[in-house]
Amino acid sequence: MNQTCKVCGEPAAGFHFGAFTCEGCKSFFGRSYNSTTSVSDCKNNGECVINKKNRTACKACRLRKCYLVGMSKSGSRYGRRSNWFKIHCLLQEQQQQQQATINSMQQNMRTSQKTPPLPPQHLNDYKTTASPAVSSPESHNSDSSIEISDARRIPMFPGLIPPSFLPPAGLLNNNPGVEAFNKRVFLDAVLQSQRSPTPEEVVTRVPINSPHQESPIDLSMKTLSERGSSPAQSDRSTSVATERGNGSEADEESDCDSEKELKQLNMLRPTPLDLTTKV
Amino acid sequence: MNQTCKVCGEPAAGFHFGAFTCEGCKSFFGRSYNSTTSVSDCKNNGECVINKKNRTACKACRLRKCYLVGMSKSGSRYGRRSNWFKIHCLLQEQQQQQQATINSMQQNMRTSQKTPPLPPQHLNDYKTTASPAVSSPESHNSDSSIEISDARRIPMFPGLIPPSFLPPAGLLNNNPGVEAFNKRVFLDAVLQSQRSPTPEEVVTRVPINSPHQESPIDLSMKTLSERGSSPAQSDRSTSVATERGNGSEADEESDCDSEKELKQLNMLRPTPLDLTTKV
DNA sequence: GGAGGTCATTGTGACCGGT
DNA sequence: ACCGGTCACAATGACCTCC
Ligand SMILES: [Zn+2]
Ligand SMILES: [Zn+2]
Ligand SMILES: [Zn+2]
Ligand SMILES: [Zn+2]
């Protein structure tokens, strides 16, 4: 699927413990869990920026970032993760990033005496709002739901997604075939949107003027390093994601992080996903 | 349909190899059957209680429970089973459960001399007695059936089921539509009865005084050629069956059974069903 | 030798194609 | 709808490369 590791930015080997990660971070997280020796404290006030070069420098910050991107070993489960689970994780992450963007914008506007911030109701976080529309993965079983308003933001389907596209409702039970197909396509769309947002999307979602570099959504990095161990088995999925219009070339070091993310590192994701659920 | 896996208690994905099971237990059973490497022995004297959390811990006990609930790969075939076949399997299982209930009740009465609380349905396991009462489907041909007396015990149709409700005979060919509808309703009733038995049901079903065995399912069945009186009732039953709120999601952990099940686990179901039969 | 990373193997389970 | 197969993922361990 050619994703990038959400922890260090390296090409991801797969979806491990709740997030796309590389082999190293997967192994690190797996080992850290049952490690008798607790991770030593950070020597930099827990503000280390993790990338592929320095990821081994500070285990505390690396592990913290693992939790931050949603990794969880609570009741880790055998077998493949369902696509809905991945979609949920990706949308949740996407939402957090948008939330962060909005916050930074508001911060800017406030300091620079601009127009008052618009209240974006659609940017609410999954967990902060106990909206019944959004169900946590713990609650729903195999065929359940994702909020529609979130789905509409997927660039692949610019506002065209009919409500029936999404799982929730009772629709699924009626025509499982269509639902299965849409689920795959939908997941591909989400993945692609995270890798290379379309220009319009960037304009609308990240109205520039952010002081420091970063567009949080843009995880672009197009290495496509074809590993020998992962041959082109993913024929089915590649068809959709093939024409990815490569994003800006991320320069190896310009990891997506900035000070803003550093601040986020202090608050861990409140509700790590329970990987035992089918979803 | 909102059934639960008869092996581990997870929500079932469908009717696989003769029992309602989840995707995992289905796959496990399919793999275990033709596995050259025999399953390693249980480290707990074969007394493990299988539930969704620990089902991967002991393969021996998981496989044993698969057989216990009636799974069989002998001649499993493609294509969907008819509802009559499912009904047969469910009734057979139900019968075994009743038998187990009766046995335990008698046991209790003998020991404690007072009315025992009726054990929750999922606590009594099938199989205690290798009852010849249950005839294997291998014995009959494509058009087997269910004995009327059994059908009458379905709580949904408290003794109201006319003999004509049941399938046999050649009548079905004449008006498949009505038959299919009734069959479906009947199946729903059976399923619901397994999920939440009504108190009356237990009372009415228990009167049997036979010490161990009870009414065998007469698969030789013949006929009951007259039918057609049932439709009015099926209307009523659908309304009831459809509004099954399935609220009984409470189980979760209640699935783990008491030590009674542990003892029962040592005995396997004697006659696995032949899934090749058309029924 | 320990820590981090890669790779192979086994078991599992969600998804899919065929029937 | 079910069966069988595919394949993504967890767990484990061997092996390698640095220090
Ligand atoms: Zn990584
Ligand atoms: Zn640090
Ligand atoms: Zn199961
Ligand atoms: Zn065991």
Image (spheres, coloured by chain):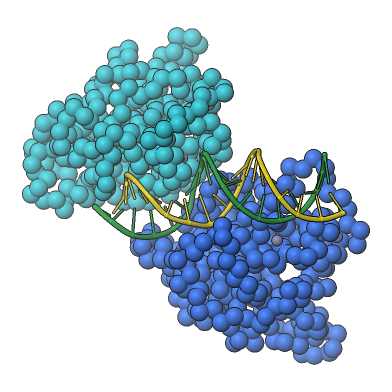
Chain colours: A blue, B cyan, C green, D yellow
A251 sits to left or right of B45: right
Residue B117 x, y percent position in the rendering: 48, 23
Query: Does residue A228 show up?
Result: yes
Q: Position of residue A169 (x, y in %)?
A: 45, 63
Q: Is residue B40 left or right of residue B98?
A: right
Left or right of B58: which side holds A92?
right
* Image x and y of residue B274, in percent: 26, 33
Q: In x, y percent, where is residue A191?
A: 56, 70
Residue at 63 percent across and 63 percent down: it is A12
Q: How many marks?
A: 0
Q: In the image shown, does B65 or A270 lie closer to the viewer?
A: B65
Residue A219's place in the image compared with B56, above or below, is below
**Which residue is at a point 50% across and 73% down the rendered structure image?**
A241
- Give the quadrant of residue B188: top left
Identified at 77% across, 43% down, the residue is A35
The residue under the point 20% across, 49% down is B180
Task: Pick out the residue farthest to the bottom.
Answer: A114
**As rendered, which of A14 and B86 lies closer to the eye?**
A14
